[in-house]
Image (spheres, rainbow, N blue to C red):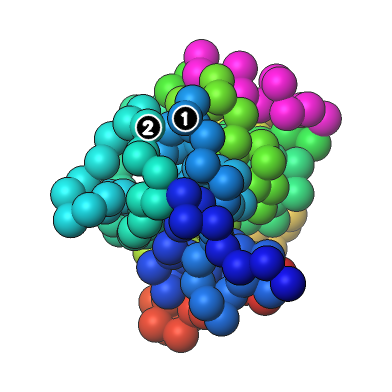
């Protein structure tokens, strides 16, 4: 069996990123790739299977290297994870079709989370660009699209873990019950008289303060929601402390 080629370039990942490698490479934590004089640092990192959205500093020969630099033969690229927490773009979040549950959970916490179940990949990239949103997905191929301005690979097999990962990755300030969980519209206070005919008799009798979605008209009030939100935030905080990279 032939050994490594001396001019190969090595992409070496921080332990936090090694789960992104194919299983046979994870224990070593690196990928050895043939030297290509036209390949940039960014191209090589993605060739190893790592979307650039997940990458922080890349160090080559002891110095941080720009992603458009072409490394020399035999170079070792030390790839570190993106810093957390990151700021959220002014437009907020955009979630792909597989993260509808996470979108509703983010909206419950008052975070701007656009989602629809019929958008294909080019439409998502176009929307993220036009609305200045960060695209959340578990599809690393989608994150490698060159036109995508900002994205994040969401960890977690269920909504609880996914929410914990997003709250850990991004600097957000929850504002519960300020956004519609159905359509993402903003909620505004609504006089009881204006929504009374939409309420069940028990709610009409016991609740006095209401909000209504400015987009779809859905009516909201505190009560069971408040307890649920507190539980969600507490669970997310606990999950963040124990969240492990997924096995893929």
> How many numbered badges does the structure rendering display?
2
Q: Which residue is mark 2?
A: 70
Residue 69 % position (x, y): 33, 31
Q: CA distance from mark 2 to mark 1?
A: 7 Å
Q: Which residues are magenta?
A: 118-130
Determine if the magenta segment contains residue 139: no
- Asked if the residue under mark 1 is in contact with the one under mark 2, i.e. CB atoms within 8 Å, the reply is yes
- Residue furthest left in the image: 63
Which-is-in-front pick, marks 2 and 1? 1
Q: Residue at x 47, y 30 (%)?
A: 37
Q: Is residue 39 left or right of residue 83?
A: right
Q: Which mark is residue 199?
A: none
Q: Which mark is residue 37?
A: 1
Image quadrant holding the N terminus, namely: bottom right
For the point 46% across and 49% down, the residue is 7
Q: Main secondary structure of the magenta part?
A: helix
Residue 197 pos. (x, y %): 71, 39
Task: Name the foreground residue: 242 vs 218.
Answer: 242
Determine crowd level at label 1: few under 14, some 14-19, many 20+ residues with C-alpha closer than 10 A.
few
Measured along the vertical axis of the image, is residue 11 above or below residue 132? Answer: below
Residue 13, can we see it?
A: yes
Where residue 2 sits in the image (x, y, percent)? Answer: 68, 67
- Residue 136's place in the image compared with 124, above or below, is below
State the residue lying farthest toward the front: 2
User: x, y (%) of residue 200?
Assistant: 73, 54
The C terminus: image quadrant: bottom right
């Amino acid at each position: 069996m032939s050994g490594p080629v001396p001019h190969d370039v090595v992409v070496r990942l921080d332990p936090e990123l090694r789960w992104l490698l194919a299983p046979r490479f994870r224990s070593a934590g690196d990928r050895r790739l043939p030297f290509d004089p036209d390949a940039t640092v960014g191209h090589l990192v993605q060739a190893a299977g790592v979307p650039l959205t997940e990458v922080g500093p890349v160090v080559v020969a002891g110095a941080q290297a720009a992603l458009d630099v072409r490394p020399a033969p035999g170079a070792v690229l030390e790839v570190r994870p993106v810093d957390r927490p990151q700021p959220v773009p002014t437009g907020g979040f955009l979630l792909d079709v597989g993260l509808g549950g996470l979108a509703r959970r983010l909206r419950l916490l008052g975070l701007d989370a656009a989602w629809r179940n019929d958008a294909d990949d080019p439409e998502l990239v176009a929307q993220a660009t036009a609305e200045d949103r960060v695209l959340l997905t578990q599809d690393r191929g989608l994150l490698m699209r060159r036109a995508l301005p900002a994205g994040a690979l969401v960890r977690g097999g269920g909504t609880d873990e996914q929410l914990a990962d997003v709250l850990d990755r991004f600097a957000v300030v929850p504002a519960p019950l300020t956004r519609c969980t159905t359509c993402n519209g903003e909620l505004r206070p609504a006089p009881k008289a204006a929504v009374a005919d939409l309420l069940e008799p028990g709610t009409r009798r016991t609740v006095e303060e209401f909000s209504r979605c400015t987009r779809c008209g859905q009516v909201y009030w505190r009560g069971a929601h408040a307890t649920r939100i507190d539980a969600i935030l507490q669970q997310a905080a606990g999950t963040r402390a124990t969240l492990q990279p997924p096995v893929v």
